[in-house]
Amino acid sequence: MKLWSGMLSGDLDKFAEEFNSSIKIDQRLVFDDIKGSIAHVKMLRKTAILEKNEADQIIKGLEVIKQKLLDGSLKVDLTSEDVHTFVESALIDEIGELGKKMHTARSRNDQVTTDLKLNLRDESKEILKLLKKYINVLCKKAKENKDTIMPGYTHLQAAQPVTFAHHLMAYSMMGLRDLERLEDYKKRLNFSPLGACALAGTTYPIDREFTVKELGFDSLMQNSMDAVSDRDYILELQSVLSIIGIHLSRLSEELIIWSSQPYHFVKIDDKFSTGSSIMPQKKNPDMAEIIRSKSARLIGNMNQSFVMMKGLPLAYSKDMQEDKKSIFDSVDAIKMALQVMAGQIETLTVNKEKMLKACKDGFLNATDVADYLVNKGLSFRDAHHISARLVKYGIENNKGLDEIELGIYKNESELFEEDIYDEIDIIKCVNERKSLGGPAKSEVERQIKFVQEKIR
């Protein structure tokens, strides 16, 4: 059955029919379509556009179809043009000709965007839950590693000592912003387009406010042309999911680096690793690599959605049929990536000794040497140059700053005393950085508490 047949003659070319069909993608909306249709028919009953007994039969038929889909006795017919055609055809099969009245005062234009909003509203709630779980895992692992000293990097060069907890909390803060973006997104998503019809509303005495309440929307879209042509809610969600993906990708990159042979900072659990078909010794961080790749997919999907919309005149165009495949793919990808990343972090083994050794080998306390001199009255710039010369000496003589003799220090400045060795102790260097946001144990504990309160 074609919902639009009547004026046109003959059948579609078989390739055009397949090209035009969206059922393989939008079948995902079948329960949203039924939900929206039930609300619509209840409104038709309330406004007496349909007689009560007619509306009751249609609603009962839709509920039967829903149950049959749930128990598997009915399958989505993939020869249907789209999900709306399938539901209407199934309804006619279930209750007869009366089913043809369901579409009164409605177009597929307002129907599909209503379905999609209902679907993405539910999906965004699920993503919120997964984000909170992921952030909780980061906080839990951070609690376990408040004393785990590791190098902090800039330009991927060892820079200053931090803790593994401090590093993980950076990703927790990113996660908080992701949560805020998703929660803020709902403010603009949750407006009902139902009742806008094709583009110009309807002459029937419909009650749009009724379907707003029935479907749990906050309000209705105020312009019928905007209601059917708006896809901002897809563009915005694609953007939000892409940012989440970028954050997960950056953490994946670090897991890949940290677990490699030159580093050995962490060990990814075997549950999240694979081997090689030719090299028996290999253990590959494939899950982290796939997450890194998925982030590229997310960005690609976002670009597809933006480019698709940029040149469309008002109101609806069939181009918008292509909005679903990419957003569904992004939703599925981010849900899986969040779960896999949470599992990787939860089961991660941290090599504390290797991390600490990397700090000592990398002259990460060089800034503290300079700060020592500043606290004794020297300008930071002069102190910086003295510290740099001491690092050069250490490199040339294969000595850490804590192994260089006091006499060498004094050759650079008489301000150095025996207490320099206490001041450049790596653990002390970290725990003295108590400024807000810093890596000191007390400050990281505050950060963990801050995040956990936010997601409670």
Image (cartoon, grey):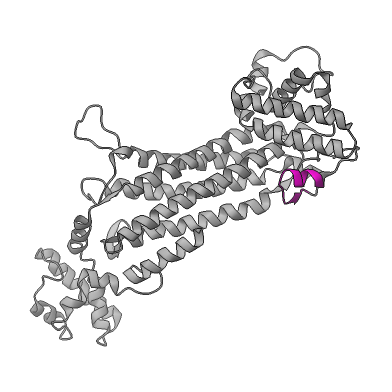
Which quadrant holds the N terminus? top right
In the rendered structure, the answer to whether residue 445 lies left or right of residue 109 reads left
In this view, the residue farthest toward the bottom is 377
Q: Residue 54 location in percent, x, y?
A: 85, 28
Position of residue 147 measured from the top left corner of the image (x, y, whole percent): 27, 64
Q: Is residue 219 magenta?
A: yes
Span shown in magenta: 209-221
Looking at the image, which residue is at 48% across and 50% down? 131
Q: Is residue 423 above or below residue 67?
A: below
Q: Position of residue 374 (x, y in %)?
A: 27, 83
Q: Quadrant of residue 432?
A: bottom left
Residue 81 sits above or below residue 129 on the image: above
- State which quadrant residue 123 falls in: top right
Q: What's the residue at 80%, 23% (across, down)?
A: 99
Residue closest to the eye, 392 or 242 = 242
The answer to whether residue 398 of the structure is visible from this angle is yes
Q: Residue 75 sits in which quadrant?
A: top right
- Which one is nearer the viewer's eye here, 369 or 124? 124
- Residue at 37% x, 70% y is 443
Task: Say whether residue 178 is magenta.
Answer: no
Figure disc tally: 0
Q: Is residue 159 placed above or below 54 in the rendered structure?
A: below
- Return the residue found at the far top: 10
Q: Percent x, y for residue 202?
A: 87, 38
303 with respect to 233 (left or right):
left
Residue nearest the observer in this picture, 316 or 284: 284
Q: Viewed as shown, does residue 343 lie left or right of 48?
A: left
Return the residue nearer the eye: 250 or 42.
42
| Image: 49 above or below 165 | above
Q: Is residue 154 visible?
A: no
